[in-house]
Image (cartoon, helix red, strand yellow):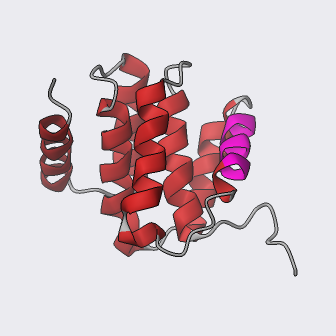
Amino acid sequence: MTEQPSHSMTPQDCLVAIMVAVSASDETIRTAELVKIQSAVNMLPVFAKYDIDRISRISKTVFDLLEQEDGLDALFGLIRGDLPDRLNETAYALACDVAAADGTLAEPELRLLEEIRHELNIDRLHAAAIERGARARHVV
């Protein structure tokens, strides 16, 4: 069995990477965020054939990249190369769900969501609808 090169990610890896990046953006990975990521991978059709063991490998890649000076740009470069356009809104919705999972949105999370919105070319009106849905799902 040939292992995939470390610089190449599946579309599902890209979705996981975005969720992990949002969770790590405020330097505190909360249990609610981890549960949200795990739940998304376990429940959503886009992850139906995803090897759940890849989550830890993708998480390590994200953490390694975020420690570098231009790591976020490098992460977005990988994602742009491997995430099909049809999954851009899915990626943004998952990012919003992870950000909202703990009931608070810290400034670093908000900045990263803005960056994701820009990098994935999410129309502002569509982004507002996605954000509103995430807020509605996570009201306490």
Given the current orientation, which residue lies at the most extreme right position? 1
**Quarter holding residue 32:** top left
Task: Give, as a single range, the part of the protein colored magenta.
Answer: 56-65
Magenta stretch encompasses residue 128:
no
Magenta stretch encompasses residue 64:
yes
Vertical position of residue 115 compared to residue 103: above or below: below
Q: In which quadrant is the C terminus drawn?
A: top left
Tell me which secondary structure the magenta stretch mostly adopts: helix
Residue for point 49% across, 20% down: 26
Q: x, y percentage for residue 29? A: 53, 25
- Considering depth in this image, is 74 or 19 the residue closer to the camera? 19
Residue for point 38% across, 38% down: 98
Task: Say whether residue 133 is left or right of residue 55.
Answer: left
Q: In which quadrant is the N terminus drawn?
A: bottom right
Vertical position of residue 139 compared to residue 41: above or below: above
**Quarter holding residue 138:** top left
